[in-house]
Image (cartoon, coloured by chain):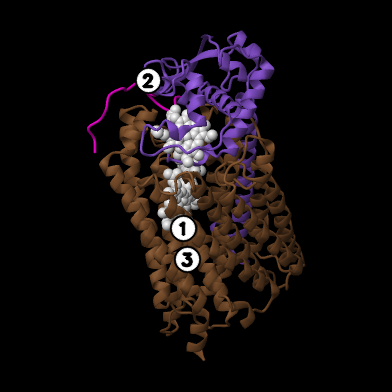
Chain colours: A purple, B brown
Amino acid sequence: MANKNLSVWTSIPFWRRSAAWVTGFASILLIWLTFDTLGQITMGTDDDLKNGVTKRVPAATVINYKIGYEMSTKRGHEVPTIGEKEPFFGKEWSADDAADLLHLGKLTSQTKNCMNCHTLLGNGAYYAPDLTKAWIDPAWSKTGPMMAMTGKSTKEEAIAEFLQHPSTYPTHARMMPELGITADEAKGLVAFLKHMSSIDTNGFPRNFGKEEGSTNAH
Amino acid sequence: MLTSIKENHLTNKGQELGMMYFRVAIILFGAQLVMGLIAAIQFLAPGFLFELFDFSVARMVHINALVVWMLYAMIGATYMMLTDETGHEGVAIGLGKLGFWLLTAAVTVVVLVYIIVQVGPGTEASLWLIHEGREYIEAPRWADIGIVVVVLIFYFNVFATYMKGEKTGIMTVMVANLLALAGLYMAGMFYTDNISMDQFWWWWVIHLWVEATWEVFVGTLAAYALIKIIGAKREIVEMWLWIEVLMLFGSGILGMGHHYFWIGTPEYWWEIGALFSALEPVPLIAMFVHVLYDWGKEQGIAEGRGETASVITNGPAMAWIVTNAFGNFLGAGIWGFFHTLPQVNIYTHGTQFTAAHGHLSFFGAYATILIGMMYYGLQRAYGVQRMKLTFKSKMGIFLTTFGVMGMTIALTIAGYEQVIVERGEMGATWNAFFVAQNLPWYVQAQMWRAIMGVVTLLGFIYLAWDLLTIGKVSKEAEA
Ligand code: HEM
Ligand code: HEM
Ligand SMILES: [Fe+2]
């Protein structure tokens, strides 16, 4: 077949060359798009935040600001909003300190293996709630149950307390275990969660926290 | 299988080394299933081993054992076919054996650390010594480096043998594809504080492995196996192989966009990911047709010659390869397509639906054909002319396949419940998550998953038992 070809469709060299061209073309396109994407998902700077420049992934100092998640009619889905300043663990964090705190938090999220129970940005395990928008989850708000339960007066302190002793504050039979998280690591993790909630995820998850009702479904 | 090397009908050292890799692979497969069952039980009885051996630990070992046993079996299968394809006895196989022992020692230490140490403080040292906490590629940094070294040895064996021997189409694809497969691992070896950047590169390893390079690897294995097991013509399987490479890489490389919908990456991935990943099932259909068509054709030609016997010289291997053709198409093609469009994925992303797809695809596309290659290795090791399915082979293949299919259906139902209630009705909060998790139908589905998991484990026991005994049994039957 290969030597006496009746048709190009049964020619091995033809398919080999086509395979090489298609693979090469797809790879080049991927690399080109990768460069563009990397530019767009590189963390912004503190100045971007001060000047109101919107970045898909803001600087670590975003922890100094109020974060929301609002419908954008222009984009047709919800987007994170960065509002006025608010203290985080009682103070405003400098660019360096905020970066260090986020570093500790992200590192701890890996060494404590959050991703093998939870999803982060929707990727990971399906045993526990998605953490993408955990920072703005209604349960942690002033009207939610968790601040009272942990006896803390701010959201960040409540989450940090929970992370250090999760099985002391259970809300469901399926509990989060003690992972030996220290007070510093817990602060870092809260910064990591707050930072993650400010990332522009193109509207995932949809309708987050909008529905307060319950369901009669089975 | 234990005595397969001493028995030694193997004609070359590469095949011996291949059998060594297969043995570790099957042990790790067993460990994978036990860990999966622990995790599945924890869904139903969350107090089970709580704060002793938590879900995260069981799941990490479950999916790591999965990835490692498959890589072991892939390396084993490559050593198996090396001399057959190149006509050369193999360069520096002794060094390859050293690599095997290094890798196996490293894997043992890594697993023991996962199980005993479990988590470390939030320091760089934990990433170096304990684990990196990134799904599927959790191996600590020291092991990453070890893996790279051993893979370099393995690649040297393959590449040098290829250069000295005959350069068939199958081997050419193998050599090029393995380079990409090994190189991609390095995209997952660095740390960043930016979670979007982290996941962007993480998918380069996971997606470009399972939906590009591993699929092409399966294509080369199937090509080789069809020649050996049913006597398919090389010209035909090699032409198919190039067409498969074209379609798999053509769709799979840019299909990666289906993981870039919601992780902080720009919107244009919606269109690119949807378009290319929607094409990914096409080569899987082609591979399915190819296996069944060649089988029918070879049998027809044999019957035309007046032969009555089956053209299949290895019943269990062929049974697993046919299961692969179905499983790859169903698990990756159909179950993948279900949730690959952004309009659907915004709701299904990160739910039990994903887990349903993950199980059927890994089992259907990879476990099946790799087990088939183990049977083929045994046939060669024992010098058996015709290997027939035993009762144990049949129970093994039936129960594992039925079990995984059952788990997939259960998880799909759980996924529907979760998607509609947690994501659709209630907006994905902590509370919404648990309302969905506690729905009676959801709990029932989790129960069925656990039951079907036990069925899968039973099938595995038959399978392992068969692998241990079939060589001797077939040999005696022929004598
Ligand atoms: C005894 C049978 C098995 C049981 C009980 C089982 C159970 C589980 C459980 C509980 C999880 C965690 C899912 C979650 O995060 O919610 C999981 C994940 C996973 N398992 Fe299994 N499993 C079994 C067999 C297998 C087999 C045979 C394969 C493939 C060959 C497999 C591949 C996977 C994969 C790829 C994941 C990750 C899925 C994802 O993140 O989407 N499992 N399994
Ligand atoms: C043999 C080939 C394949 C394997 C082994 C495989 C395996 C997996 C696994 C394990 C995951 C979950 C990853 C995680 O833990 O987050 C996943 C996700 C996904 N797969 Fe596949 N897959 C294959 C082919 C395909 C194909 C052909 C398609 C599309 C047509 C597809 C579409 C998807 C999508 C859209 C997701 C993301 C799910 C989510 O958003 O949660 N897959 N795949
Ligand atoms: Fe993918």
Q: Which residue is mark 1?
A: B34
Q: Quadrant of residue A47?
A: top right
Amino acid type, residue under disc 2 in the picture: Gly
The residue that appears at 65% across and 73% down in the rendered structure is B16
Image coordinates for residue B415, horizontal then vertical, percent: 35, 42
The residue that appears at 51% across and 20% down in the rendered structure is A156
Q: Which residue is mark 2?
A: A144
* Front residue of B216 and B132: B132
Q: Tag 2, which secondary structure?
A: loop
Would residue B395 appear left or right of B104 to someone viewing this image?
Answer: left
Amino acid type, residue under disc 3 in the picture: Ile
Q: Tag 3, which secondary structure?
A: helix
The reply to whether residue B328 is visible in this rendering is no
State the quadrant of the N terminus of chain B: bottom right
For marks 1 and 2, give the CA distance: 39 Å
Q: Is residue A128 magenta?
A: no
Q: Tell me the number on the disc at residue B321.
A: 3
Would residue B57 appear left or right of B360 to someone viewing this image?
Answer: right
Image coordinates for residue B192, horizontal then vertical, percent: 65, 32
CB under 8 Å between callouts 2 and 3? Answer: no
Does the beta carbon of the residue at mark 1 sit less than 8 Å from ligand 1? yes
Q: Which residues are magenta?
A: A203-218
Mark 3 crowd level (few <14, some 14–19, many ≥20, 10 Å Cα): many
The reply to whether residue A187 is visible in this rendering is yes
Amino acid type, residue under disc 1 in the picture: Val
B268 versus A58 height, above or below = below
For marks 2 and 3, give the CA distance: 55 Å
On what subunit does the disc labeled 2 rest?
A
- For the residues tagged 1 and 2, is the chain the same? no
Does the beta carbon of the residue at mark 3 sit less than 8 Å from ligand 2? no
